[in-house]
Amino acid sequence: MTYDPQVAKWFNKVDTNRTGMLNAEELQLALRNNDLTTFDIETVSLMIRMFDKDNTGTIDVNEFCQLWKYLGDWRGSFDRFDRDGGGSIDERELGNALNELGYRLSPQFVMEAMKKFDFRRERRLQFDGFVHCLILLQRLTTGFQQFDTQRNGNAYFSYEGFLTAVFKHT
Ligand SMILES: [Ca+2]
Ligand SMILES: [Ca+2]
């Protein structure tokens, strides 16, 4: 496949031990928020689970280019939802984002989501928390919809059915 030489260059720069692969620590250095903090390690692990197609536990340059493109798309929506251009997503902006993306969720839920993904306890989401939140929401919504057979926002779960759905989608 072809890849962006700039992205490959960045890959080589963060592959400090020159293995041709990024481990979690190296990948963490490669992924930055707008305030230049590195991604939270939980989000880095999520990225590895999603993009480590050959199951090496590390990210090679091809996987990295895919990941970079994926995050670039998310970056676009992040910037769009960061209405005040402050480089982060506050509770109000998150509420609007979820609404625009078609989620019907209460202010109470938005508050809980803020708490969970505000990794640095600053009452706003950096890019990592925003992406992490939306990926989990997407996946869990898909998981839920498989049980919500009447499409009315309610589903019946057995205990094990619930656990299986959560394990499968997170
Ligand atoms: Ca890999
Ligand atoms: Ca903002």
Image (cartoon, rainbow, N blue to C red):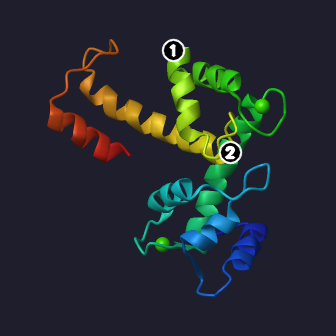
Identity of the amino acid at label 1? Ser
* Image mark for residue 106: 1
* Residue under the point 54% across and 74% down: 23
Task: Determine which quarter of the picture holds residue 90.
Answer: top right
Does the image show residue 20?
yes
Query: Mark 1 or mark 2, which is nearer the start of the sequence?
Result: 1
Does the image show residue 1?
no
Task: Using the image as rendered, state which of residue 112 and residue 164 is in the foreground.
Answer: 112
Identity of the amino acid at label 2? Phe
Residue 29: x percent and y percent? 68, 67
Residue identified by numbered label 2:
127
Position above or below: 81 against 10: above
Task: Determine which quarter of the picture holds residue 144.
Answer: top left
Which of the image's four quarters has the N terminus? bottom right
* Image mark for residue 163: none
Badge 2 marks a residue whose secondary structure is helix
Task: Determine which quarter of the picture holds residue 40.
Answer: bottom right
Position above or below: 23 against 78: below
The answer as to whether callout 2 falls within 8 Å of ligand 2 is no
Q: Which residue is situated farthest in the top direction here?
A: 152
